[in-house]
């Protein structure tokens, strides 16, 4: 929660400063003279792959874990091992490794010659630092490691040893979420915080900078609007000739904005949250195509088990039977598959005995009569959050409210921005009765979703609104992950899924089939060609894209940092995004007047140039 609070504070400060700048600029009688630059402004629209997302990524590896953040992290940072389409692991930063006979000690030998984006060499000490930082901050993907990792050591510069508290059969799989940071760089950017001598552990700085060694590096970040990455020319695995030079993450799912950007080819791939009809219309544009990508991402209606009336199991059970699942997958999320319990069928370890979600209104009406709230349900309205960045969720929320009215339950449907959802779900008293959230596995096994969704460690995060507080289930999940024999481990998974299913703590509408529009003539995307990697973020390893450029028309802004002489480049599409008080909006305002604006106080220069091709 600390990272999210700092992020919001940063945004507020930025908006205040920008508003002041706008006021001063508009009040000026004459514009400042152009400031000369030792570097020529670059216009790179034709080299930029742009994609819309539900939000701008949080690129701190110890905090970010949602879809956009995961996609950014897998490009900015390297991991010891890398996942494949089949779920197998390939060497990445680690060239080889050994595991002790008791399954407690993992020894990795690192690749030589890897450098971080600032030129620092990557060593075993950086791996130790990255694991310790993750475990200390206890956010993001830390829950994958905190129950198991006892300590991490570096016997020499290229050897890392993880010692576990107990055997963990999936430890290797989880390492695709241990992103390696430059210890020296992070320690040089500590801010005020709650981690003792480590202050904020660099989390404020890492909101807008990276300390990674991945194939891309941060070029520009506006937490309110967008983020731009640029290829790292000294990447240890080389730069693929066809990969996009720049990648822009645009944090909006606003349908009109997405349609305008895609129609003008200013984005080449849409987000996955547009309504099906919108994607159909966009895919009908010349050169465009609709792609459906199977995923292991499941939509959950997370039920708060501590708040009336959903603290009653009979209310939860009745709601489960009352919902019209078929209407949801045909009207709100066409192309998606009906779910079958808490684990998607595509994941190894899914319990095949759990039935597919289906409506049984007669049974729902019988069950609700067993509730202690029956007869006074009107006094206990159910608050239902849907995420405003995902427009189709509103349809599902309305369908839910309509179906619940048939069993006497009043539903208050509330659209809530994603960052507010995260904040509210961190506090039990602020959490709604129900929230709709899609979750994806962090590694290719049923235990990933079971752990992130139903362990006690995930309470207070956006991945668990249930507030389950069930130590038995949590302990069973932890124990199942120590079982080395796969058959025995799966049998334990089945027991856990059955317990969760029979407690009616979640409703399972569907498993998501990603539906997007994209331009295949512009971007050759491996996931769209039938080779997706069913782990959040890994469908967007940009160095494996082949990008042919675009004929979009945009304005470009080049921000030159006078201290280190690095250019920060970003595209801004005038008139196609909401005009708000953020830096890109200022860039466009000045570009209209063909003027230049400089701010020595903030130690940067903004140069605007018109561009068209």
Image (cartoon, grey):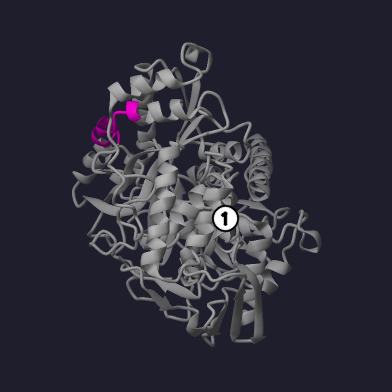
Asked if 410 appears above or below 441 in the picture, the reply is above
Asked if 307 appears above or below 15 in the picture, the reply is above
Instruction: Report whether 204 appears left or right of 575.
Output: right
Q: How many marks?
A: 1
Query: Residue 444 location, x and y as percent?
Result: 39, 63
Residue at position x 59%, y 42% in the image: 469
Query: Residue 24 location, x and y as percent?
Result: 68, 38
Q: Examine the structure image and report whether residue 322 is included in the region drawn in magenta.
A: yes
Name the foreground residue: 544 vs 328.
328
Residue 314 sits in quarter: top left
Judged from the image, the secondary structure of the residue bearing numbered disc 1 is helix
Looking at the image, the residue that sits furthest to the right is: 197
Q: Main secondary structure of the magenta part?
A: helix
Residue at position x 61%, y 69% in the image: 149
Residue 160 sits in quarter: bottom right
Residue at position x 48%, y 12% in the image: 378
Q: Is residue 389 visible?
A: no
Instruction: Report whether 91 appears left or right of 153.
Output: left
Residue at position x 80%, y 59% in the image: 196
Span colored in magenta: 321-332
Query: Residue 193 location, x and y as percent?
Result: 76, 54
Query: Residue 171 location, x and y as percent?
Result: 50, 70
Asked if 354 appears above or below 330 in the picture, the reply is below
Q: Is residue 572 visible?
A: yes
Q: Examine the structure image and report whether residue 441 is included in the region drawn in magenta.
A: no
Residue 301 sits in quarter: top left
Residue at label 1? 140
- Neighbor class of circle 1 (other Cα within 10 Å; few <14, some 14-19, many 20+) is many
The quadrant the C terminus occupies is bottom left
């Amino acid at each position: 929660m600390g990272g999210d609070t700092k992020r919001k504070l940063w945004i507020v400060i930025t908006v205040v400063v920008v508003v002041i700048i706008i006021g001063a600029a508009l009040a000026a009688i004459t514009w400042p003279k152009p400031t000369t630059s030792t570097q020529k402004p670059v216009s790179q629209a034709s080299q930029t792959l742009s994609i819309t997302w539900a939000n701008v990524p949080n690129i701190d590896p110890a905090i970010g874990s949602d879809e956009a953040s995961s996609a950014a992290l897998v490009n900015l940072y390297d991991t010891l091992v890398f996942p494949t389409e089949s779920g197998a692991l390939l060497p990445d930063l680690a060239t080889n490794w050994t595991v002790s006979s008791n399954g407690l000690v993992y020894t990795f030998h690192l690749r030589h010659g890897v450098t971080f984006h600032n030129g620092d060499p990557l060593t075993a000490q950086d791996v130790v630092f990255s694991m310790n930082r993750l475990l200390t901050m206890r956010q993001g993907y830390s829950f994958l490691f905190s129950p198991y990792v006892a300590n991490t050591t570096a016997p020499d510069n290229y050897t890392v040893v993880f010692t576990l508290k107990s055997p963990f059969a999936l430890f290797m799989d989880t390492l695709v979420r241990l992103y390696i940071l430059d210890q020296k760089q992070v320690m040089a950017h500590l801010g005020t915080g709650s981690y003792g001598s480590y202050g904020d552990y660099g989390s404020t700085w890492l909101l807008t900078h990276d300390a990674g060694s991945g194939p891309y590096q941060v070029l520009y970040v506006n937490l309110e609007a967008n983020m731009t990455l640029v290829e790292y020319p000294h990447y240890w695995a080389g730069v693929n000739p066809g990969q996009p030079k720049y990648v822009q993450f645009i944090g909006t799912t606003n349908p009109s904005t997405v349609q305008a950007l895609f129609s003008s080819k200013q984005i080449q791939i849409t987000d996955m949250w547009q309504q099906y009809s919108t994607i159909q219309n966009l895919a009908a544009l010349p050169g465009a195509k609709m792609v459906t990508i199977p995923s292991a991402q499941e939509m959950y209606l997370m039920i708060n088990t501590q708040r009336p009336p959903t603290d009653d199991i009979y209310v939860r059970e009745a709601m489960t039977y009352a919902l019209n699942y078929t209407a949801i997958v045909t009207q709100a999320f066409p192309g998606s598959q009906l779910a079958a319990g808490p684990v998607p069928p595509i994941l190894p370890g899914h319990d095949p005995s759990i039935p597919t979600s289906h409506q049984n209104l007669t049974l729902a009406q019988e069950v609700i009569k067993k509730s202690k709230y029956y007869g006074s349900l009107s006094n206990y309205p159910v608050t239902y959050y849907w995420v405003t960045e995902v427009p189709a969720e509103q349809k599902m929320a309305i369908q839910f409210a309509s179906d619940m009215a048939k069993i006497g339950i009043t539903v208050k449907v509330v659209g809530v921005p994603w960052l507010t959802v995260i904040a509210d779900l961190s506090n039990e008293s602020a959490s709604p009765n129900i929230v709709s959230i899609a979750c994806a596995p962090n590694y290719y096994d049923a235990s990933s979703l079971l752990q992130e969704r139903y362990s006690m460690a995930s309470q207070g995060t956006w991945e668990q609104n249930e507030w389950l507080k069930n130590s038995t289930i949590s302990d069973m999940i932890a124990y199942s992950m120590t079982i080395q024999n796969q058959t025995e481990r799966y049998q334990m998974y089945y027991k856990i899924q059955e317990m969760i299913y029979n407690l009616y703590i979640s409703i399972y509408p569907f498993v998501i089939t990603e539906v997007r529009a994209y331009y295949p003539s512009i971007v050759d995307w491996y996931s769209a060609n039938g080779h997706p990697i069913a782990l959040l973020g890994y469908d967007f390893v940009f160095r494996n894209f082949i990008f042919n450029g675009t004929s979009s028309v945009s304005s470009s802004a080049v921000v030159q940092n006078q201290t280190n002489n690095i250019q920060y480049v970003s595209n801004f599409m005038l008139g196609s995004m909401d005009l708000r008080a953020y830096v890109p909006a200022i860039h466009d305002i000045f570009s209209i007047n063909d003027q230049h604006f400089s701010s020595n106080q903030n130690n940067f220069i903004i140069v605007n140039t018109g561009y068209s091709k």
